[in-house]
Image (spheres, rainbow, N blue to C red):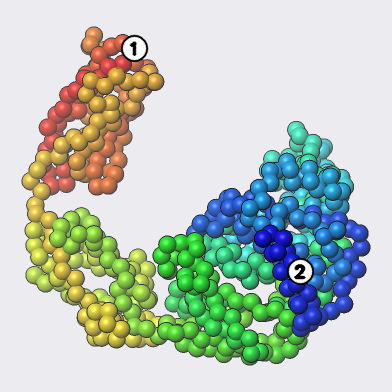
Amino acid sequence: MKNLSKYIIIAALGCMAMGANAQEKQDWGDFKLWIDPGHSGRENTGLFGYSEAQKVLRVGLATREFLYRFTTADENTIHMTRDDDQDNVSLEERSDMANAWGADFFYSIHSDAGGGQNTTLFLFGGWKLNGQYIEKTPHGGKRYGDILCPNLTGVMYNTGTRGNYYDRVYYNGDVDTHANQYPYLSVNRRTNMASLLSEGGFHTHPVQQGLNINESYKRLEAFGTFRSILEYRGIERPDLVMLAGVVTNSENGQGIDGVTVTVNGETVVTDSYESIFHNYVTHDGIVHNGFFLFEDLEPGQQYEVTYSCPGYTSATRTVTMQSDSQGLSGDNVTWANVQLTNTAPATITGNSVYNPDAVNKRDDIVLTFSRNMDRASVEQAFSINHNGHVTLSWDNDYTLRININQLLEDMDYIITIDGTIAKNSETGQFLDGDGDGTEGGNYVFAFVTIPPDVEAPYIVNTTPTENETMKYTLRPVIRVEFNEELDWNEDNAVDAITLVDADGNSYEGTLSHAVVRHASVLHLYLNQDIPRDKCFKVSVKGGFADLAGNLSEPKTFKVLS
């Protein structure tokens, strides 16, 4: 089956070469390139269950495909560490195989993990000696990184870069002299040829990872890589251009699923839960990308781009394909991003109340709207029976927070949001409060507040437990868990928990208080070791008040060391 797949790929490449923009292949020569998609199988899983290993393999395969299509390179001059998701190759085996084959350059493709802005990173073998930067020999990794950095970064969506670095300088700092005078990364250290490792954005970044899942986006990254390799080799780059874009919701900036994009009689439909995302997440609405890509269009040609999607406004854009065949990769990618506006009336898609028959006044009720709302109109449309007094606030334009701590206890309440008054801020459509698909319906939510709290707080669990032997440590942590939250203040901490041995010796410690799932938890961290083979009395003082003012009883129990 694996060999059959290779024949299919070769046949497809042949068809592509005969298609639009077919150009004479450039002479590759006998230069031996090793493409190393990092990791194996589904290693380094990122957001949405999609792994770094899966992504970079497909970037590598597409890079090789471009090289085969536009140069005379073949399997005798380009090798890959792995070409499917089943190959499992160790870190050492990668460099050993490239060394044995006699590669002239080793290029390792990765993505990264991190937060904040999505960025690329490029690392070649090098260090510092007496203030001087030293590149590993044979040289070439730095030069390729200097070329690849603007080319790969330039074709990616909303992506910056951390730059191109000597690897030991990046990881061990820009000091005068490094203690280890050799490359930091294994793929740079163990390879006998010029080498570079690239990090193509973060697989922990929601937008980037949504794009990573898209097959065409990986080809776009490969386009930037392919052109960089040709530039590094001094080979003329083909007059090949790309039309790319991201279709987003005008209200929240999310990519829109299922958009039909048409250019020159060809259509692309953006990814959706049904088409691909269901392979990685269990519910619709978790991941989006809204990405599309058209290849083999004519440089300098003007095209009309149309966008349509059920439930959204349509749009048309006219673009001219930018081209500079010997310029940067990004100079040959025309972006046709567009925002579409939702045409459906807003609904309420989320309510934070788990059990409407037992609502605690301490917990805000949080309503989530499907669209950005005109806040003033929602507040005007809001009402609650029994003259209930609540406070409204907004986390953002689609999240309404209702503070109910001044309502009566053990009372039936009904919240109503009038659908003929509340409206979204984008199009002014009225709320579809009853969810029937048409605007103007009221949202109605009935709930009951819990009865007054007349029960004293009590201890539900301790660590250690009664008569338990404290093993494996001479400084155990005493943990006391209550059934509800206490009205805690620093005065409570004085002698809240005491530990005394059978001889009357007390053991001091530091007390902490935390609220976990609406219940107070106390921890006593001892300041000294306790002796072995003794009996201890743990005393928890009484008089702790809960939020209703009920007072706890003291508790004493014995433990062993």
Residue 179 in the image, given as x and y percentages of width and height: 75, 33
Residue 436 in the image, given as x and y percentages of width and height: 27, 82
Mark 1 surroundings within 10 Å by alpha-carbon count, few (fewer than 14), some (14 through 19), many (20 or more): few
Task: Give the quarter of the figure containing the N terminus.
Answer: bottom right
Reading the chain from its start, which is encountered first: label 2 or label 1? 2
Residue type beneath disc 2: Ile
Dot 1: element: loop
Residue 346 visible in the picture: yes
Direction top: furthest residue: 503
- Compared across the picture, whether 9 is left or right of 249 comes to right
Q: Name the residue tied to disc 1.
A: 532
Mark 2 surroundings within 10 Å by alpha-carbon count, few (fewer than 14), some (14 through 19), many (20 or more): some
Q: Quadrant of residue 93?
A: top right
Residue 125 visible in the picture: no
> Which residue sits at x=34%, y=83%?
345
Q: Name the residue tied to disc 2.
A: 10
Dot 2: element: helix
Residue 142 in the image, given as x and y percentages of width and height: 81, 53
Q: Is residue 510 above or below residue 146?
A: above
- In three-dimensional space, the C-alpha distance between marks 2 and 1, rounded to whole angstroms, equals 74 Å
